[in-house]
Amino acid sequence: MVDIINIHHLLSHSACVIEYVDFKDFDQYYASVHTTSDLLRYVAQGQLTATPNTKFCYSGLGYIILGALLENITNKSFKEFLKETIFDPLGLTNTHTIHDCFLKDLVSALPNLSKPYIFENRKLLEELSINLSTAFSKACVISSADEFAKIIHSLFHKQLLTSASFNKMITPYFEKAPGANCYSGYGLFIHKDKNHHEYYTHTGRIGGYHSYVAYIPTQETCIVFFSNKMEESVFPDLNALTQAISQKDGK
């Protein structure tokens, strides 16, 4: 796998590696906190689902590998790197990267943290057993909507990337599905409205947490939706709203 997969494949979701949550022993592995080295050794058993760079194949595992690579290159933890290069320069005080514990261990340290909930047997239950160490760089940032919007605005105003890297980020590489009119970039998805204007989105979920983030260049508008219970059903409505805003004349 190492010989044929490169950084472009991982960033564009075209590496075609199986998700580690599908490993047979994942439930047992998930029960403990792990270091980045432990996690990297564990995910190394992943197999390919197709030939890399031939199709879109969403993979959180790819972004875990990228996080481990970043730590190796910078000689800093993922947490330290994001704090020093993004969070502190932007003056963010409610945004954190935490990947060395279970969510339940943060409740007392972060009193303003919204607890996630899931539906089980028609009951709404707290879901505090999320293992942030296995989520690592694919899903370990805790933030508020206003601060995350600040990150997105800074990203699209080219304050966080060079122009060359930014252009690679918003380049469409693979269509998510035939006729979807949605393409993978680097860490985001690229859409076109009926006026052929591009806008960018990404969704996320872990445990009971769900998120939807969009940036609309024609309006210089960012949409950030965070939920602490199962809300996937609202994603189509949010995307329709994003498209409508993108098609609006003027700012």
Image (cartoon, rainbow, N blue to C red):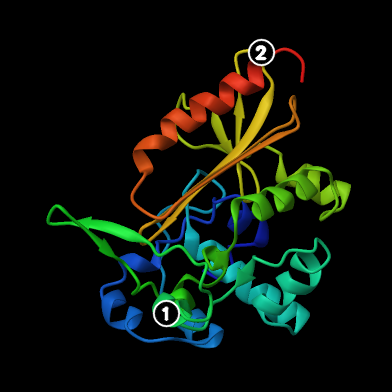
Residue 147 percent location from the top left of the image: 68, 55
Direction from residue 238 to residue 47 in the image, left or right: left
**Residue that badge 1 annotates:** 102
> Measuring 64% from the left and 16% from the top, which residue is drawn there?
247
Which quadrant would residue 24 be assigned to in this image? bottom left
- First in sequence: mark 1 vs mark 2: 1
> Measuring 42% from the left and 31% from the top, which residue is drawn there?
236
Label 2: which secondary element: loop
**Residue that badge 2 annotates:** 195
Q: Pick the residue in front: 106 or 97.
A: 106
Q: Residues within 10 Å of mark 1 (few under 14, many from 20)?
A: many
Answer above or below: position of 37 versus 162: below
Residue 94 percent location from the top left of the image: 65, 65
> Measuring 50% from the left and 44% from the top, which residue is drawn there?
56
Direction from residue 245 to residue 73 in the image, left or right: right
Residue 102 percent location from the top left of the image: 42, 79
Q: Residues within 10 Å of mark 2 (few under 14, many from 20)?
A: few
Q: Pick the residue in front: 150 or 29.
A: 150
Direction from residue 54 to residue 207 in the image, left or right: left
Q: Can residue 192 be spotted in the picture?
A: yes
Answer above or below: position of 211 versus 67: above
Task: Tell me the distance, in whole angstroms, between the alpha carbons under discs 1 and 2.
Answer: 45 Å
Which quadrant would residue 89 be assigned to in this image? bottom right
Residue 30 percent location from the top left of the image: 34, 78
Instruction: Give me the disc on residue 71.
Output: none
Mark 1 or mark 2, which is nearer to you? 1
Answer above or below: position of 179 versus 77: above
Q: Pick the residue in front: 109 or 152.
A: 109
Q: Can residue 44 be spotted in the picture?
A: no
Amino acid bearing label 1: Phe
> Measuring 85% from the left and 52% from the top, which residue is drawn there?
159
Answer above or below: position of 249 versus 222: above
